[in-house]
Image: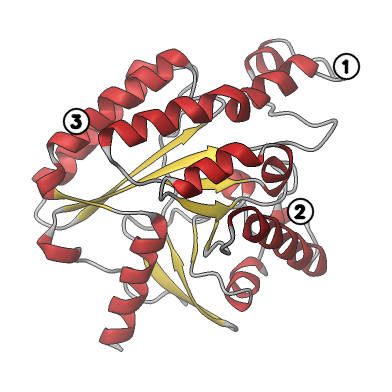
């Protein structure tokens, strides 16, 4: 059963901010179903190579734009990386790692979803992705995000047994919490309700405005809160979306004194340490 949520942030900060950049790949013959052409004109008997190229934009172009924006505002982020992407495009993964950003595991590919796997196949997927990212960066990931945030009943224990500290697969509370598993504790860090993927139809400006309004709301509350920002390099890395993301980060940078801007790893360590001290 989940233990109690953490309700304070370091140095008395009012709001914790965590930024996630998803850097994703799909296996050959697969593509994101939400790609503009696939969603607008689905064809069941055609390999949608346009949608495949649309997804590739994240590794070839979008990630570099997002890295530049993060560097300009001196803000840390967590990059959720598909193992397959690290094999195909190691350069942006190495660049993000060298810039001090956290590299988290995001399954081997976006079409390999833990909730659809047997326990043995899921364990192998975790091992494979972990090994690829360790070899690519020289350090092993400590956090995991499932494609579609869809874990299986086996995922928590498999992650804890594999040395993971946190998962981003649940959204059942406002604040992070620690879950007990058969292999030890695992911190759950809530996934965003307003990612760029979910806001494709609403548009980039709506993404910015929603998060600005939500941050204002959190700062007005009597208790600590958390702002989850998620962009996908193949969506939020495109010029118009990236500009709105840039403007959002400008607002966050101006409020830096009231915010704890942390990587997912730093947040998970705080959650786990606080829970341990209280037990």
- The residue pinned by badge 1 equals 46
Secondary element under disc 1, as helix, strand or loop, is loop
Can you see residue 20?
A: yes
Q: What element carries label 3?
A: helix
Report if the CB atoms under discs 1 and 2 are less than 8 Å apart.
Answer: no
Are the residues flagged by discs 2 and 3 in contact, CB closer than 8 Å? no
Tell me if mark 3 has few (under 14), some (14-19) or many (20+) residues whose alpha carbon lies within 10 angstroms of its own.
few
Which of discs 2 and 3 lies nearer the camera? The answer is: 3
Q: In which quarter of the image is residue 91?
A: top right
Q: How far apart are marks 1 and 3 (CA)?
A: 44 Å
Q: Name the residue under label 2.
A: 116
Q: Position of residue 22 (x, y in %)?
A: 53, 39
Q: Can residue 209 be seen in this view?
A: no
Q: Residue at x 75, y 48 (%)?
A: 112
First in sequence: mark 1 or mark 3?
1
Where residue 168 appears, x then y in whole percent? 49, 55
Q: Earlier in the sequence, mark 2 or mark 3?
A: 2
Looking at the picture, how far across and down is residue 72, in whole percent?
29, 31
Q: Write down the quadrant of residue 249 in the picture.
A: top left
Q: Is residue 209 left or right of residue 239?
A: left
Q: In which quarter of the image is residue 26?
A: top right
Q: In this view, does 174 lie above or below 4?
A: above
Residue 210 lies, with reference to residue 275, above or below; the image says above
Mark 1, mark 3: which one is toward the viewer?
3
Of 244 and 8, nearer the camera is 244
Q: How many marks can you see?
A: 3
Q: Name the residue under label 3.
A: 251
Q: Check disc 2: other Cα within 10 Å, few if <14, some if 14-19, many if 20+.
A: few
Q: Mark 1, residues whose alpha carbon is within 10 Å: few (<14), some, or many (≥20)?
A: few
- Side of 274 relative to 110 (left or right): left
Horizontal and vertical percent position of residue 240: 41, 13
């Amino acid at each position: 059963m989940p233990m109690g949520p953490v309700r304070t942030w370091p140095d008395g900060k009012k709001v914790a901010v965590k930024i996630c950049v998803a850097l994703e790949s799909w296996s050959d013959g697969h593509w994101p179903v939400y790609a503009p052409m696939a969603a607008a004109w689905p064809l069941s008997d055609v390999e949608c190579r346009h949608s495949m190229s649309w997804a590739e934009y994240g590794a070839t172009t979008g990630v570099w734009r997002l890295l530049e924006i993060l560097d300009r505002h001196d803000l840390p982020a967590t990059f959720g990386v598909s193992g397959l992407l690290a094999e195909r495009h190691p350069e942006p993964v190495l660049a993000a790692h060298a810039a001090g950003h956290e590299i988290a595991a995001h399954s081997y590919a976006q079409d390999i979803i833990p909730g659809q796997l047997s326990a043995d196949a899921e364990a192998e997927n975790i091992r494979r992705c972990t090994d690829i990212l360790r070899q690519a960066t020289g350090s092993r990931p400590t956090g995991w995000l499932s494609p579609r945030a869809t874990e299986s009943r086996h995922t928590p224990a498999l992650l804890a047994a594999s040395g993971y500290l946190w998962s981003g697969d649940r959204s059942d509370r406002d604040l992070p919490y620690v879950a007990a598993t058969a292999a030890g504790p695992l911190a759950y860090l809530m996934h965003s309700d307003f990612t760029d993927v979910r806001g494709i139809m609403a548009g980039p400006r709506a993404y910015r405005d929603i998060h600005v309004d939500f941050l204002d709301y959190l700062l007005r509350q009597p208790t600590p809160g958390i702002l989850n920002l998620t962009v996908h390099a193949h969506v939020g890395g495109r010029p118009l979306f990236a500009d709105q993301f840039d403007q959002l980060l400008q607002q966050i940078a101006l409020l830096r004194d009231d915010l704890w801007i942390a990587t997912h790893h730093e947040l998970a360590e705080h959650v786990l340490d606080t829970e341990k001290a209280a037990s």
